[in-house]
Structures are given as structure tokens and as C-alpha cells.
């Protein structure tokens, strides 16, 4: 295993070497010397595309890593997040002879385990592939883990862990923490995705939560023919949810379908606490009667009750344009540091909400709001809990599907209606009033205690006995730096005068000594001004103009790229046939 990991390390290093050199030149233009090189947004976009091609070349583990990075704006700049969000995981399936060996090891010969088995895979991805078969007279979809993928994943994980300490040396403290947690999260996530027994449990749990809802269809697991390496489910066909012409021909109410989709995900996240985390169009289809079909639960997660409450507060804050409520929710979720500059962050949030409003005051897009927040997260930077990153991604992808179904779809309005109907808004109002009643009591007590204290203070002031003690918080050692500069300046002045006098009246040796002293002091003084830590740095400014310039640059870049043509016929068939590994796709 270690031998393979060492070999894999050199393969990965060779693929990443050009990018490594480019990043080192950003720090020193000529690698060992030179100034920092300015990196523009266009350069980052080009590098993101190169890195994306590298990840695709390196195979399953790195494809999955790219997909995970697309949900982590606290780790990567927005240009990389946008590029990685396009990452698709479509690779030719392995030869039947290899997959046949997996089935025989787990279930026995395919012709004996099933009534019939089609050896041509109906879909293939990096971690698994799907076949169609019949069992007890019913059509089933059989998801088979790609042969020998476990060994490759383990070798790649070792390479990532070996590389992490080197990468951390070149980034800031906050982002290094995010990278360390990301590595741990990725290790857990990819092991979960190749564990089909876990996927079966998550699928069954979510299916039970919607047992009484006839508008949603989740394929049932055939437990007798499912193992950690094979997942057998009922075969459910349907029309891809973004196949607009086919949906219109079926007479489907697309606006109602979009609203139902959003409500389903709101229930999963806010009410049930367990959710399907990969809602791209390949994993969603529609039956002729309008029933929504969900495929592929390899990427799924849980939401803690406390986080659920804060997500509700976050949605309500956006709906009410309450900046303080939004920031409070972010702080309490662990996304925003309590020490962050609330005024600056508030300006960013306010501009983000204003910039995404439609022609009517209440029409704006949650996807664009989250996108602006993600940009801010990288630039400050902030941290994202693992499952919260998945929730943010689910919100943006679901909203994108909904807008495809109905260009005028109002995500916030539907979310607000759902919260009101489920009683969350009234509960929040009740808790607010309870909190205000306690504040009123405290205010009344303070009103009684204040007059005597004020009178004593005025008496002290009148008698000249009032003293004020103030502690100055100099976390940047600014005063120490200024004091050092004054001392160096005084010493330099004395040194220059002494050198001049010695040059006129003393020996050459004394003059040289005084001059050397003066030069040394001058160097220390210059160094104090050039030190990055000693400077007074202004708070970052985020203005509407800068946000619009970024959007304009991204729009111009996007306008130059031709849309990829659809290659399928709009049909999503088989429980995991749309996408067996929980992969990211953009339409």
C-alpha cells in the first residue's frame, strides 16, 4: 500500500508541478528573489480551469475533492469555486469482467443472483457504475462499486495528507485551519460515498420521512441484494426535471413543481434534519402525474437541531432584510467570527441584498445572496462547518433548478410562506417578545438604580474628585512601534551630528565608528517602516462599485464560453442512473 502511495505521490506532483511553480512565482517573481506578482481575477480563472483539468486527469479521488472544494468558499477564491461547481463526474464504465468479479464476491454469479442481468452499464462515474436487471419479476437498478477503487482512494488520501503540511506553510492561519478541517471532512465524506450500506440507510431514513407524501417518490432498497459494495434498488423511470419541453408536453405545472421541490428540501433541512445533498438535475426526475423522483443518496447529511434554528433565523433575516439578524445567525452558526467588524460585514450584506433585488422591491435571488456571502467568506476569511457548506450548496442548486422551471420563481417568498405555515415565524416572534420582556424588566430596575449613581458622580465632578481610568488595547503594538521610531530617530540625529563633529575635530577611526553607528541606526529605522506588522492597515472596503465590477468581469468571461449541448434525450431512468456517485453538474 505504501509503495503505491509513494508512486502515486510522484504522479500527483508531476501533474501539479506547473501550478506549483506559478504560485511560487506569485510570492517571488523569480522564485528565489523579486517582488510579489499581482494576480488578477482573470489569471485566477485561467488557473482554476487548469487545476480542474488536472483533477479530472488524476481520477476519482481528486474529482471528488474538486466537488467538495466547490462547496468551500472559505478555502478557495470565488473564481475557483465557480469553476469547480461545473465539475462533472462522467467516465466510461469499467469492463464487465471487472464489475462481474465484484458481484460474484458479494452476491455470487450474476446469472444466479438475478433473474436476468444486462451487462451493459446504463451509467458510469468515478466511484461506481449502474446496471439494469430483473429480480422476482421486477426491474431493478444495481449500483456496483468500481473495482479496486478502494486502494486508489486510500493511496490518494495518503498523498493529500503528506502534502497538507507543505501547503499550510504558504497560507494564513485561518485558512490553514479550514484546510485541515477540509482534509478530515474529505476523508470522512469519500469513505461514506463508497459505503453503499450507509447510502442505503440514509435513503431509507429520508424515504420514511416522506412516507405519507404521494407527491414524492424515492426508490426502495432491495436489502437481500445490497452490501457495502453493491446497492440494489427498484428501477424508477422519469423525465429529467430540466427537460422543459417534455414537461410542457406532459402538462406539468412547472411553477407548482418548483415550489414543491423547494418545500421538500426545506422540510428535509429544517424539519427532518436529514437531507439529500446532491439535487442537480441528473438526480431529479418527474413522473407523468407530477410525482418528483429522487435518485442517488451517496451525498447526504444530517443537520443538528441548533443549526436548524439558526438556518431559520438566517432565512427570516434575508426575507425581512434584517442585517443584524443575518449577522447574528452567522455568528451563532460558527461561520462568522464574533470579533469580525460588524459594520463592514453589515455593509457587505446590505449591498449584496440590494444588488440582487429585481425590479420589484421584494424580488431577489437567494442564490446570488449566498454567492456574495461566499465571496466575502474567502476575503475575510471565515470558516464553514462541513454540513453547513452542504446546506449552502443545496440552497443554490435547488434555486437554480427552480429558476430553470420558472424564470420568475421567488425562492424567498416560498421559503417565507413555508416558515409561516409551519409556525416557525410565530415561534420566533414569541421568543423575541419573551426576550424583550426580560429586557424591559432589566431596564426598569436600571431606571431605579441610575439616579443615585448619577447624583454621586455629579457630586464628585463638582468637588474635583472625579478620575477616569482607561486601558488602551494595542493588539498591533502600534505604540511600541512609534516609540521605537522616536528612539531610532533621536539616535540617528545624534549619530549624524557626532559624525560631523568627529570628522572636523577628531581622528578618522572615531569618525568611521560614529558613521557606522549612524548607518546601523538608520537601517533599523527604515526596517521599522517597511515591516508589514507595524503598519496601520485600514478596514477592507466593499462597495457597490467593486461588487458590480466583479460581476461584470464574471459575466464577460461567461459570455465568451459556449454552452455545452445536451447529450441525453431528457430521460432519467433507474434509481441511481442519473448519477451514481452524487456528482456535481450544471445545466
Image: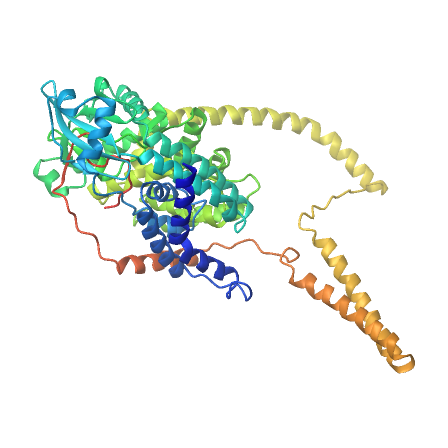
x, y percentage for residue 439?
57, 27
x, y percentage for residue 332?
50, 33
Could you say which is closer to the camera, residue 20 or residue 82? 20
Where, by quadrant of the figure, is residue 231 drawn?
Answer: top left
Could you say which is closer to the camera, residue 23 or residue 411? 23
Residue 218 appears in the figure = no
Residue 333 relative to residue 447: left or right:
left
Where, by quadrant of the figure, is residue 247 drawn?
Answer: top left
Q: Quadrant of the N terminus?
A: top left
Residue depicted at 55% across the width and 63% down the height: 32
Residue depicted at 52% across the width and 60% down the height: 27
Q: Which residue is at the far bottom? A: 504
x, y percentage for residue 9?
42, 46
Query: Total marks drawn?
Result: 0
Residue 13 appears in the figure = yes
Residue 506 relative to residue 489: left or right:
right
Where, by quadrant of the figure, is residue 409 drawn?
Answer: top left
Establish if 51 lies above or below 90: below
Could you say which is closer to the camera, residue 400 or residue 12? 12
Establish if 224 lies above or below 155: above
Amino acid at each position: 500500500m505504501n509503495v503505491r502511495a509513494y508512486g502515486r505521490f510522484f504522479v500527483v506532483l508531476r501533474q501539479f508541478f506547473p501550478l506549483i511553480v506559478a504560485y511560487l512565482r506569485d510570492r517571488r517573481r523569480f522564485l528565489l528573489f523579486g517582488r510579489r506578482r499581482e494576480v488578477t481575477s482573470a489569471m485566477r480563472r485561467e488557473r482554476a480551469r487548469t487545476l480542474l483539468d488536472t483533477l479530472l486527469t488524476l481520477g476519482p479521488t481528486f474529482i471528488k475533492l474538486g466537488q467538495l472544494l466547490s462547496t468551500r468558499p472559505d478555502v478557495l477564491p470565488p473564481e475557483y469555486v465557480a469553476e469547480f461547481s461545473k465539475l462533472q463526474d462522467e467516465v466510461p464504465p469499467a469492463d464487465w469482467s471487472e464489475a462481474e468479479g465484484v458481484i460474484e464476491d458479494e452476491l455470487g454469479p450474476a446469472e444466479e443472483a438475478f433473474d436476468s442481468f444486462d451487462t451493459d452499464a446504463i451509467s458510469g462515474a468515478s466511484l461506481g457504475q449502474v446496471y439494469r436487471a430483473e429480480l422476482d419479476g421486477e426491474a431493478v437498478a444495481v449500483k456496483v462499486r468500481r473495482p479496486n477503487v478502494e486502494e486508489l482512494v486510500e493511496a490518494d488520501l495518503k498523498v493529500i495528507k503528506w502534502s497538507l503540511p507543505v501547503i499550510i506553510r504558504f497560507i494564513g492561519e485561518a485558512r490553514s485551519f479550514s484546510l485541515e478541517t477540509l482534509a478530515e471532512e474529505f476523508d470522512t465524506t469519500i469513505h461514506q460515498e463508497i459505503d453503499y450500506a450507509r447510502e442505503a440507510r440514509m435513503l431509507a431514513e429520508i424515504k420514511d420521512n416522506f412516507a405519507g407524501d404521494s407527491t414524492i417518490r424515492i426508490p426502495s432498497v432491495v436489502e437481500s441484494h445490497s452490501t457495502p459494495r453493491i446497492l440494489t434498488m427498484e428501477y424508477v423511470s422519469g423525465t429529467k426535471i430540466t427537460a422543459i419541453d417534455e414537461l410542457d408536453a406532459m402538462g406539468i405545472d412547472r411553477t407548482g413543481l418548483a415550489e414543491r421541490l423547494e418545500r421538500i428540501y426545506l422540510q428535509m433541512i429544517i424539519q427532518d434534519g436529514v437531507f439529500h445533498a446532491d439535487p442537480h438535475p441528473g438526480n431529479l426526475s418527474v413522473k407523468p402525474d407530477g410525482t418528483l423522483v429522487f435518485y442517488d443518496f451517496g451525498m447526504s447529511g444530517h443537520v443538528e437541531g441548533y443549526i436548524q434554528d439558526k438556518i431559520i433565523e438566517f432565512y427570516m433575516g434575508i426575507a425581512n432584510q434584517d442585517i443584524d439578524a443575518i449577522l447574528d445567525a452567522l455568528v451563532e452558526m460558527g461561520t462568522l467570527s464574533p470579533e469580525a467588524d460588524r459594520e463592514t460585514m453589515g455593509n457587505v450584506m446590505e449591498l449584496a441584498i440590494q444588488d440582487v433585488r429585481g425590479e420589484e422591491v421584494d424580488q431577489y435571488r437567494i442564490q446570488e445572496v449566498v454567492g456574495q456571502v461566499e465571496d466575502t467568506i474567502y476575503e475575510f476569511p471565515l470558516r464553514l462547518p462541513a454540513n453547513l457548506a452542504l446546506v449552502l450548496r443545496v440552497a443554490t442548486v435547488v434555486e437554480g433548478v427552480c429558476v430553470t422551471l420558472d424564470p420568475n420563481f421567488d425562492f424567498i417568498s416560498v421559503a417565507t410562506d413555508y416558515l409561516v405555515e409551519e409556525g416557525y415565524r410565530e415561534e420566533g416572534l414569541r421568543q423575541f417578545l419573551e426576550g424583550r420582556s426580560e429586557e424591559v424588566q432589566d431596564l426598569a430596575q436600571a431606571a431605579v438604580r441610575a439616579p443615585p449613581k448619577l447624583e454621586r458622580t455629579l457630586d464628585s465632578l463638582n468637588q474635583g474628585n472625579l478620575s477616569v481610568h482607561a486601558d488602551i488595547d494595542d493588539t498591533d503594538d502600534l505604540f511600541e512601534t512609534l516609540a521605537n521610531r522616536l528612539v531610532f530617530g533621536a539616535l540617528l540625529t545624534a549619530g549624524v551630528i557626532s559624525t560631523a563633529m568627529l570628522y572636523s575635530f577628531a581622528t578618522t577611526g572615531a569618525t568611521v565608528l560614529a558613521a557606522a553607528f549612524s548607518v546601523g541606526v538608520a537601517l533599523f529605522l527604515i526596517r521599522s517602516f517597511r515591516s508589514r506588522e507595524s503598519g496601520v492597515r485600514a478596514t477592507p472596503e466593499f462597495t457597490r462599485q467593486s461588487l458590480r465590477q466583479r460581476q461584470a468581469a464574471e459575466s464577460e468571461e461567461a459570455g465568451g464560453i459556449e454552452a455545452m449541448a445536451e447529450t441525453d434525450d431528457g430521460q432519467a431512468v433507474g434509481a441511481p442512473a442519473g448519477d451514481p456517485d452524487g456528482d456535481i453538474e450544471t445545466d
